Amino acid sequence: MTMQFGSATEFSNMCGVTLMNTPIGRVVAEVMGAKDGVELTEYPSMIRVDGVKLLNFDYDELTDALGEEFDGSIFEEISSTHYGRMVHLDDKTMLFASPEDAAEYIGFDLTVQ
């Protein structure tokens, strides 16, 4: 991945989050990086996780990979910045590139009046 700075006016269909580069953050990044459409970029103190359309952090999947309980509070602890619409549920955290895709979770009304 090449680093690009600046702004673009077109829709990227991307969403992402930065995770702390800790033992837990590294395992979460490895699980996410194995998924289709997900790219990892490592820095000394953080790991950037970028995905096309949707990132789904499934807590059961992450609990299995870690060998210890993973939930929303741990996700909040290891994550910092994000882009996209973030939705927290009891069993997962999701990031959507498009608010339309997140509409059913965030109360976004798609009807034209």
Image: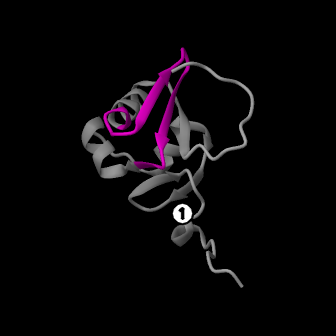
Q: Using the image, determine if residue 9 lies above or below residue 5.
A: below
| 85 vs 73, nearest the viewer | 85
Q: In front: 62, or 105?
A: 105
Residue 81 percent coordinates (x, y): 63, 38
- Asked if residue 91 is positioned above or below residue 55 in the image, the reply reads below
Left or right placement of residue 101 versus residue 65 in this view: right
Q: Which residue is mark 1?
A: 102
**Which residue shows up at 25% across the image and 43% down it?**
64
Residue 15 is inside the magenta segment: no
Q: The magenta stretch spans which residues? A: 32-56
Residue at horizontal 54%, vertical 14%?
Answer: 44
Residue 10 vs residue 70: left or right?
right
- Give the residue at x 29% y 46%: 61
- Residue 90 percent across, percent down from the top left: 43, 62
Which amino acid, mark 1?
Ala
Secondary structure of the residue carrying tag 1 is loop
Q: How is the image coloured?
A: one colour
Instruction: Tell me which corner region of the image, top left, top right, bottom left or bottom right, holds residue 38.
Output: top left
The quadrant of the picture occupied by the C terminus is bottom right
Query: Which of 28 and 13 lies nearest the eye of the viewer?
Result: 13
